[in-house]
Each structure stands twice: as C-alpha cells, then as structure tokens.
Amino acid sequence: MSSAFRVDFRDRSTRARLGRLETPHGRVETPVFMPVGTQGTVKGLAPRELEEIGISMLLANTYHLMLRPGAEVVRSAGGLHRFMGWEHPILTDSGGFQVFSLAELRRVTDEGVAFRSHLDGSPQLLTPERSMEVQWALGSDVAVVLDELVGFGADRQQVERAVERTASWARRSKAAWEKLGGRGAGGRLLFGIVQGGVYPDLRRRSLELTLPIAPDGLAIGGLSVGEPKAAMYEVLADLEPQLPEELPRYVMGVGSPDVLVEAVALGYDMFDCVLPTRLARHGAIWTSEGRVIIRDAPFATDLRPLDEQCDCYACRYFSRAYVRHLFKAGEMLGMRLASVHNLRFLTRLMESIRQAVREGRLRELREAIRQKYGTQTKEGET
Amino acid sequence: MSSAFRVDFRDRSTRARLGRLETPHGRVETPVFMPVGTQGTVKGLAPRELEEIGISMLLANTYHLMLRPGAEVVRSAGGLHRFMGWEHPILTDSGGFQVFSLAELRRVTDEGVAFRSHLDGSPQLLTPERSMEVQWALGSDVAVVLDELVGFGADRQQVERAVERTASWARRSKAAWEKLGGRGAGGRLLFGIVQGGVYPDLRRRSLELTLPIAPDGLAIGGLSVGEPKAAMYEVLADLEPQLPEELPRYVMGVGSPDVLVEAVALGYDMFDCVLPTRLARHGAIWTSEGRVIIRDAPFATDLRPLDEQCDCYACRYFSRAYVRHLFKAGEMLGMRLASVHNLRFLTRLMESIRQAVREGRLRELREAIRQKYGTQTKEGET
C-alpha cells in the first residue's frame, strides 16, 4: 500500500493518531485542516498570508478550474502551484461534488456526468478519465477519483447504485491515472473515495470496492451534506475499524471546531471546508470564548483584538472596533482580517489537537470545544 | 512661517524642488504622492502592504470618518493611526470636498454647511470649528482648513463668493485649531487652502487671503473637478510665482502619472488621489509600456508579470494570466494585487521623478511619461 503516509503515534483513549504525509511539495503533519482555494485562491488571501497562518496544504476545486481558466491554461502556466504562487502541497477533488451541487441540466450515465457549466451554460462532460486528466494538468500533489454523489435524504436504492457506480468509476480513474504517469512521475498521490450515505452496510461495501484502487489514501465523501452531526459521527465510528491503519483518511467538507476534534478522536486525519473563510466574509469570528458576530453594536468601541488568545496578523494589530468599522463600511480589509483570523484559529486548533493527542489529553480538549462550539446539530452551522 | 518644511534642492530648468516635511509621525520626502484611505483603510490593502510599497504618507477623509465610525470612536481608540494600524504620517482633508460631492440636501451659509448624511439621511452641520475638532480627534499629522468648493463650470460670481467664504472659514478654522492646541501639542500641522476655480486673479486673491492663516502649508483646492488638464496647468503655472518658497504646496485630487510629473515640474510638492486604487479595482493596470486592461483576452495565457520593470509583490509572484483569471472569477485577490501594483507603480514614479530632479533630467522624464500617459485631456481619465 502507500508508503507516502506514516502513522507516528496512536492515542490510547481515543482512536486518534498522529501521522505525516509525504507529497511532491513537502511533508504534511496530520491531523490536518486544508482551507479551500476554490478558484485557485483562498478567498481574499495571498499565499504568503496562508504561509504565515501556518497552513500546510490547500484544497483546490477541479470543477471550477476546469471551467475557468481551464486546465490547459493552468498546465501551460506550469501547473497550479506556480499559477497561484503556492509552493506547498495541494489536494484536488474530483469535480464530482460541484457537478452535483452547482451544474445545471445534469445527466448521469455510466460513462460520466453530462452537464451545463454554471458559468456560461456550455455543455460539458465529466468522466473519470477527464477528471484525472484535469487533475494531472493542474499538477496537484493528491488527486481524488471521481465519485457519484447523492444528497442526504436519498433512498437506499439510490445510494446503493451510487456506490456501485463510484466503484466502477474508481477503477477507470485508477487506470487513467496510471496511464498519465501515476506515482512514477514525481510521487503524486491518488485517493479513493468511500460513499454510502448514512447506511453502515453500504459504507462498508463501498470501502471494500474502493480499497483495491486506493493506493495512497481514502476520502470519505457524502458527509456534511445536510445530515445531523450525530449521523455523521455514527458513520465515521462504524467505518473506522474497517479502515486500513496505513492509509490516510480524509473526511471531505468538514471544518467546524467541534466536528474536527470529534473526527480526529474517531481516527480521521485530513479535513477541508470553506466554512472558516465563508463565515469570516460574513463577519462571524471564532474566538476562544465562542463565536462572535463582529457587526454587533457592542463591538463598536471594543478595543480588544478579535481573540485575546490569538497571534494572527489581525489580532496583533487591529481591534474589534476597527474590524467592525470595516464591515459596517463594506471595506474589503474587514473580510481579509476576519479570514486570516478564522484560518489561524483553526490552524491553532489543529496544533492544539495534535498536542493533546501527543499528551493524552484529547478527551478533555474535545469536551472543552464541545461546550463552546457543539451547540449546533449540523456541520456548518457552528 | 513653517519650520516643518525645508526645500533641499531646486531644479534649474523647471520649477521643481525637492524637500522634506517633518511631522509628528516622521519625515516625508517631497514631491510625494499620498494614497487615499477614505474610510480608514486604503481599499483592499493592509498597512504593512502600504509600507512594503514604500508609501510614506496617507490621506484620510474627515467627512467619511466623522459619519462612520464617528470621531469619538476613533479618538477613544487612540486616534486614527492606532485605529487603522498605520504608524506613519496622515493628512486629513477638511471634509468640504465630500460634503459638496456626496452629501444630500446641502445648504451653505456663512456659518457652515448643513447637509444630510449620504449613509442614513441624518442631519449634520459641518462648520470650520467642527472640521477642526474632528481632525483633531482623528489625530492627523496635517489638517486642512474647511473651504467652500464650487464645481468646474461655476460662474465667476459664484467662485468669487466661495473665495471670500473660504477665507473667512479659514480664519475661524485657524482660531479653532489654536484653541485645540495648535502646533504646541506634538507638532501637528495646519494647511490653508487656495480656491478660485480657473480664474487666475481669483486664485491670487484667494492666496492673499489664505497666506496669513496658513502656517504650515498650502493646499490647492478646486482642481481636478472636470476641467481640462490644460486649464489646470495654467492655474498652477500662474499661481506658482506667488507662492512662498518655504511652504509645501499640495495639489488636491491628482494622481495620473502625466499630471504628477507636470505638477512637480510646475513647482508643487504633494498630491493625493483615489485613481491608482480605483483603476486597479476595475482591472486597469499601469505599466512601463502604458495602461493595460487585464481582463482583455490576450492576457489569458500571458505568463509575464503585470509589468516587467516592477518589483512589487504582485509582479514578483504572479502572472498576468493569473491576475486576469482572478478578475474574471470575481476573486478579491485580483483587486488586491492590482492595487498593490498600481500604488507601487506610482511610488516608483515619484522616486524616479525625485531622482530626475536631482540629476537635472526632469524634462526628459516628463516627455517620456507624456508619451505613454498624456493622451487623455482630463485628469482621472488616464
């Protein structure tokens, strides 16, 4: 199996583990949270700010980049790292999720997904082979095979069919990947993907079908799509004992503080979400005391930093009063400072989670985070 | 007169001069261009980026800040420098220009200007005294007395009346300023303002009335309000021989490359304009080859930096193709990178203007800039 990932430490009282993933653009310590650079930029932030925040790996969206500026443009610019000025690891998703959430006039066949671009209505076809070609052109460190996604609330039969199709697409993805160069060319990694909704037996079935074609890691898809957190945790807890120890496990689309610590305790290693930057752009700030809405009137004269515990650029130089003013005045810098802060908050959270695992204190930390951030029942509402 | 300003060098073949202005927040070399931090932030940029660009002084708008967040909020935050995290000099305007361009239901009397806030319709009164109080609360290094502004196209009688009223307001401004503390408290500077439209004799009359109350410098108002560049240059050329050598001369609201070099050659020292950042947000990029519109199709695959001569952050790390992509995708980072670049372009232009003055090459430089940037007949169209 994969030699790119190594587990260094296992917690005794939870299923948490510490590991490291070796990629062509460097090593990533896990558990890790990856911010999302949807269109080749983490909204509002420059690469050097992400470095300062301590981000070690980004996610970029294949769907968005294949439509604009197009895989060919990025390839001829020397790949996505060079195009966007980010020298550290990048994971690309397969494009599947956005096709199923954004694209119009979608038609799924065994061949792939035919759809119209949400940008200009142009007809497009995303097949397993096309997804691999685009991700190869982007030059990501970790690619993910194309899957069929069904939303929360889909009936068992739909989920079952999606699991089978995902497996068949995975085989084709893998074959296309090998043909493009596979691990041979510079050590790029390929993750399989496990679907199956909230049905434990379908999750297991999907895992079984996926494992043979998942040389470097496993993405867990189809979570954080509207189901209650409890259902998500159940799926993750049930699936974990079936997962091979030596593969990194990536839960797609989660980024709330309480969900992250829970998923780490359940034995998962990698996470991504637009949540920290999206909340930031709406003026919702994560602090060590819980979430605050910076537009609220009491902050008008509050000269404290966004979070007194934080060491980010925003907290070192600016007050809540100033950030509130920027939001009220509609100034871009407000969204920037809030984004810097929320990402640093989450990066520090991951640091403290890794530290707590190392010191056998993860259960205490989980309890503390739950109390401040666990009041919402669905991921993304935090 | 002012001891805060000193002329170090005079050009022989033009009226240009090199000088330095000492302020409570440090020394500024002139000629200098000041970007505009309208609402307590230069749109899109953080203070440390402005420092990296080489900005030595900012302008902030009294009108905007008195309405939001309010002078009291800024004062209780320790003043505008601390509030916005900018440790270098700040000049505040009087608020007059925005009252005359933005406010609603404006009524000018000898007392001041009554108007309704463009934000919430609340009734406001801007008097010379109020303008001074607000600027004092903001804690700017250079304050400007309140003036009455009439637009380009106003008849002679209107301009004449505005000149008289500006002079009477200036006397009241100066008295209010002295009462607040004046130069005594930390060396803050006060500039008078010369109006008079495009009428040379009214400009002279305004200067005569203003000089006695302009201890530290002279702002030239009422230009760049829609008149042809030729008319602006005529006013500046006619007025210059009347100006005392030892006062800094600040032409308000100009920022096109060709106008800056022309105004320096005519003997002026300080300038401000929203133009570089406003153009940038619309994707208009100043380069050493002239202006380019980054959204244009040919840039889709152009891997060169915005300007091959430039050393700014945007030009060091990103391509035209990437910046174009950001603009097409509506990503904030595009406006940021373009703003960084345009401001660095103008800062480097001012550096090369000062260098050219020192070396007796200003006329050649003016000619070169005219050829690339002098095709438009009005300021702001560059």
Image (cartoon, coloured by chain):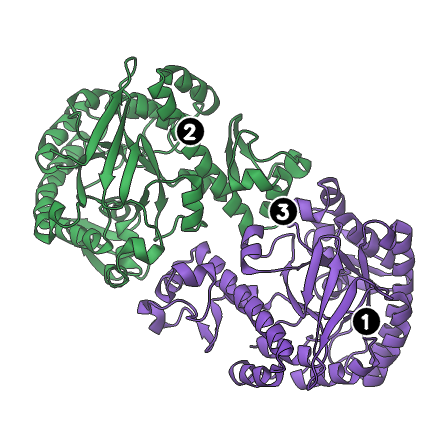
Chain colours: A green, B purple
Instruction: Specify the amino acid type for callout 1.
Output: Glu
For label 1, the residue is: B246
Taking B241 as reference, is A257 above or below it? Answer: above
Q: On the image, which quarter does residue A237 sit in? A: top left
For label 3, the residue is: B85
Question: What chain letter is assigned to the residue under label 1?
Answer: B
Taking A99 as reference, is B270 above or below it? Answer: below
Tell me where residue B137 appears, x and y as whole percent.
78, 48
Q: Separation of disc 2 and disc 1 at Cα?
A: 58 Å
Taking B378 as reference, is B121 above or below it? Answer: above
Question: What chain letter is assigned to the residue under label 3?
Answer: B
Q: How dense is the environment of label 2, judged by Cα within 10 Å: few (below 14), some, or many (20 and up)?
A: some
Helix, strand or loop status at disc 1:
loop
| Quarter of the image where the C terminus of chain A is located | top left
Instruction: Specify the amino acid type for callout 2.
Output: Leu
Instruction: Specify the amino acid type for callout 3.
Output: Gly
The answer to whether B260 appears left or right of A18 in the picture is right
For label 2, the residue is: A349
